[in-house]
Amino acid sequence: MKILVLNSGSSSQKTALFDLSPQAADPASPLWEGKLEWDGSKETITVTNSDGKKFREESRVLPEKRGSSLGKMLDQLWQPPTGLDLDRKDIAAVGHRIVHGGPRLTEPAIVTPEVKRAIASVSAIAPLHNIAGLDGIEYSEGYFPKVPQIAVFDTAFHSTLPLAAKVYPGPYEWYEQGIWRYGFHGINHAYCATRAARLLGRDLASLKTVTCHLGNGCSLAAVADGRSMDTTMGFSPLEGLMMGTRPGSLDPGILTHLLRSRQITQAELDEVLNHQSGLLGISGISSDMRDILAAVGTGNERARLAFDIFIHRLQSGIAAMAGSLAGLDALVFSAGIGENSPEIRTSCCERLAFLGIELDQTKNSLAIPDVEVSSPGSRVRTLVIRAQEDLCIAQTAMNLLSPC
Ligand code: AMP
């Protein structure tokens, strides 16, 4: 059962091939992985296979042709040096990560023209991601014409939010129009909550967990009984925590003020909110937490402020999520920052001791996911768990095709 996963983002297209057949040696490790990134007028394809063979190519492209090399990347599945001993008919399904499923797509779905229309209808809400996801589906339909295409939605896990967490307290008509909290990163939040229960030897149904997905995009989820009860991202992936280039929650009065006083057009506002805020906007240096931490080390004051805001919002967010759960048993850190930065985990947990969160500093500084990093006496168990979104998408696609 070989499943290809296509994860199409705003500045990259990642792909991974998994063998999920019962006789596979290590189903969790991809047989083959590719990444197509574009940066200005340059496009880079990097491919590796499980034998350690690599392919890398850099080319110049016109901005309107960005991403047109997806076929070239997929061709490396069959071509030396990274090609595997298989052909297109060996691919059982292609799983696609779709960020926004909108009001109707709350379960993984086999792609049909209707599903594509539903994805397109909410593209305006998540413009960085949904259009790229649809492009990926359409390309894959042409490249693998007889293979089922499965869409897996980042919003789906949060479809269980109670109304009090889901509905914005604007006019009720907003809710009737589908303007509500959808939440994102659901594939990883669901995985982290389940994995934490397994690592702790606890029943998922009895566990109250806050999962922190801290990557380029950042969000928290409050999970009880394996169900999402609250989350920080909202109608769009702009709400909630501070992120690499997105601000997270803002007073909406700032936005109406900027628009009313004509300091900014709506298109410029979109650009500022999606690409020029967050760590980058405050530090003026970078959207990458590694650069921020390095600059803090050299005494850069704006980097320090960016770091402090990030921690402030993360701490208050975790406390708010614990409030939504009326308790907390486990805290999970995941994704690029969550998995790799002991400094962020320490700074964030320091002032959350009142919730019963206490880290073991040695375990935290040496953490290699998946691992527990709390001190033996900590009431709340804190874990670092590697995000495995592609594997989850592959497993979801397999389960949809051949339910057990
Ligand atoms: P992701 O979106 O999960 O791939 O996360 C990417 C982000 O993780 C990068 O932009 C960095 O900000 C962050 N990151 C990766 N490695 C580290 C690290 N060692 N320390 C701090 N942040 C990191």
Image (tube, rainbow, N blue to C red):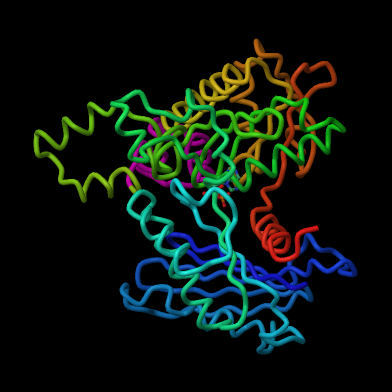
Region of the chain picked out in magenta, as a range: 276-303
Identify the residue at horizontal 60%, vertical 25% (top origin).
Answer: 347
Q: Nearer the viewer, residue 315 or 270?
A: 270
Identify the residue at horizontal 70%, vertical 47% (top origin).
Answer: 386
Whether 324 is among the magenta residues is no
Residue 326 figure quarter: top right
Q: Nearer the viewer, residue 236 or 332?
A: 236
Please provide percent x and percent y for residue 16: 65, 68
Query: From the viewer's perspective, is residue 363 above or below residue 186?
Result: above
* Drawn side of residue 267 relative to residue 2, left or right: left
Please provide percent x and percent y for residue 278: 39, 39
Residue 85 figure quarter: bottom right
Identify the residue at horizontal 44%, vertical 74% (top origin).
Answer: 43
Query: From the viewer's perspective, is residue 161 above or below residue 105?
Result: above
Please provide percent x and percent y for residue 403: 76, 59
Quarter containing the N terminus: bottom right
Whether 285 is among the magenta residues is yes
* Drawn side of residue 308 relative to residue 267, left or right: right
